Image (spheres, grey):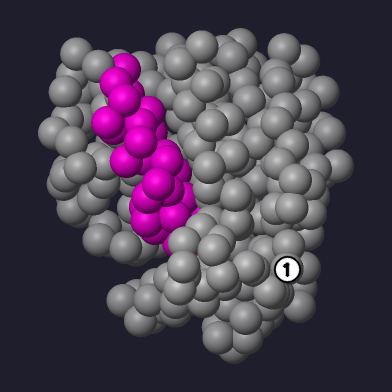
Amino acid sequence: MLFNIHGHPAYCYTGGKNFNPTLPTAVFIHGAQNDHSVWILQTRYFAHHGFNVLAVDLPGHGRSKGDALTSIEQMADWLIALLDAAGVQQACLIGHSMGSLIALETSARAPARVSKLALVGTAYPMKVSDTLLNAARDEEQTAIDMVNIWSHSTIAHKPSCPGPGFYVMSGSQRLMQRMSKINPAKVFYTDFSACNAYANGEQAAQTVTCPTLFVLGKKDMMTPPKATSTLRTAIAHSKTTLIDNCGHSLMAEQSDAVLQALFDFAKS
């Protein structure tokens, strides 16, 4: 599904279903150097079980055109503009990593538009090491390799995870490489810089009144569960689901557990 946002085409995956304005809407927001496809299992299930789905490609990512936006605040404004273009008055926002910061900031800027908030693989502050920032700027493939290793709980997934012949780490690596190929403008560095610079997380969290869920991987080295303490304290009414044997790439490593946590939350 395509919308025109700020003069550029913006793509949203709908889970294989036509958009139906009478149904509740779930908006899925990907992280750095990714696109909507990281949510493929979760979005298809939601779309076939009573929800509208808008799994966005952020500007400069996937099928959405325009330059990658340089701040979390700009991305939140873009997301609000997308809700306007889609005619969605209120939605459940589900964001992973950088996408979780976008969802959080959107909730602070437009609280009446957010019915529920799910923050997956999140942290605040979401600081990025100088080594990784420099690699993303100067040696993008090195940065991809570093993140791919650090985002998974093990380099030796069993052959049946999640299906015979499917290799989780290779899939994540190829997606990040594809982002580099379709947009050579150092999107990884732009995304990481936006995460690193975002300073409104605690203030935004203090404004959240809607139901909120944290979904965290117990073995996440990129955004370890302890790094959510500021947000979880600020959103005192929030709930947390910790997923075993799982790193930062939660949707790939433990796809069914992530789906169950998100769907139960969205339906409750």
Residue 95 x %, y %: 52, 40
Whether residue 132 is situated above or below residue 75 in the rendered picture = below
Above or below 23: residue 101: below
- What percent of the width, then of the height, locates residue 15? 26, 41
Q: Residue at x 56, y 70 (%)?
A: 159
Measured along the vertical axis of the image, is residue 30 above or below residue 266?
below
Q: Left or right: where does residue 160 sit relative to residue 89?
A: right
Residue kind at label 1, given as amino acid type: Thr
Which segment is the magenta one? 24-50
Residue 66: where, in percent of width, then height?
A: 28, 61
Q: Is residue 47 left or right of residue 195?
A: left
Which quadrant of the figure contains the N terminus?
top left
Q: Is residue 255 visible?
A: yes
Which one is nearer the viewer's eye here, 198 or 49? 49
Q: Which residue is painted at 40% across and 18% down in the image?
A: 113
Q: Which residue is mark 1?
A: 154
Q: Is residue 31 magenta?
A: yes
At 86% from the left edge and 42% from the top edge, which residue is drawn?
226
How many labels sit on residues? Answer: 1
- Does residue 75 appear anywhere in the picture? no
Q: Secondary structure at mark 1?
A: loop
The residue positioned 26% from the left and 57% from the top of the image is 64
Q: Is residue 175 magenta?
A: no
How packed is label 1: few (under 14 Cα within 10 Å), some, or many (20 or more)? some
Give the image location of residue 67, x and y in percent.
Answer: 34, 63
Query: 195 above or below 51?
Result: below
